[in-house]
Amino acid sequence: MEAIVQLARILDDGDGAVAKDAARAPQLFARAVEEGAHAEAMFELGIMHQCGRGGFPVDLRRAVDLHSDTARRTGHEMAGLNLAAILAQG
């Protein structure tokens, strides 16, 4: 599963050897979540919804759900910080 997340990160950012693929990256992150609630994959999907990346429109409600679930289930600190930042904005 870690390999799926790493490939998704490479596709999300692009790499000298691998072209950026904004459509495929979120699919791979979602696959990693479905196969085992991978903390980094959940966090990355939350960021994508928060910032409107990966072909997603900005959807703060979905970002809150993802960051909250990630922080609660895995203790992911950055997910908790992003959740707090979104909630502080109102």
Image (tube, rainbow, N blue to C red):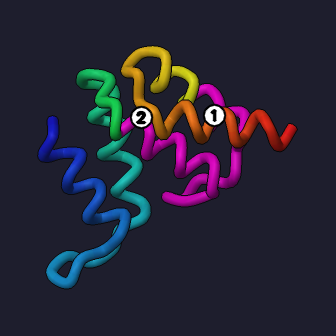
Residues 25 and 80: in front is 80
- Identify the residue shown where x is 63% and y is 56%: 51
Q: Is residue 8 left or right of residue 27?
A: left
> Residue 53, how many percent across, how many down?
55, 59
> Residue 57, how many percent across, how many down?
67, 54
Whether 15 is drawn above or below 60: the answer is: below
Please rate how many residues cluster around mark 1, counting C-alpha atoms within 10 Å: few if below 14, some from 14 to 19, many from 20: many
**Quadrant of res 39:** top left
Toward the top, the furthest residue is: 73
Which residue is the site of mark 1? 83
Q: Identify the secondary structure beneath mark 2.
A: helix
Which residue is the site of mark 2? 42
Q: Is residue 23 left or right of residue 46?
A: left
Span highlighted in magenta in the image: 41-65
**Quadrant of res 14:** bottom left
Please rate how many residues cluster around mark 2, counting C-alpha atoms within 10 Å: few if below 14, some from 14 to 19, many from 20: many
- Identify the residue shown where x is 53% and y is 48%: 47
Q: Identify the secondary structure beneath mark 1.
A: helix
- Type of residue at label 2? Met
> Residue 1, how many percent across, how many down?
15, 35
Q: How many marks?
A: 2
> Residue 70, how many percent across, how many down?
46, 26
- Type of residue at label 1? Leu
Q: CA distance from mark 1 to mark 2?
A: 13 Å
Q: Is residue 86 left or right of residue 20?
A: right
Q: Quadrant of the C terminus?
A: top right
Residue 61 badge: none
Residue 55 in the magenta stretch? The answer is: yes
**Predominant SS along the magenta part:** helix
- Identify the residue shown where x is 49% and y is 58%: 54
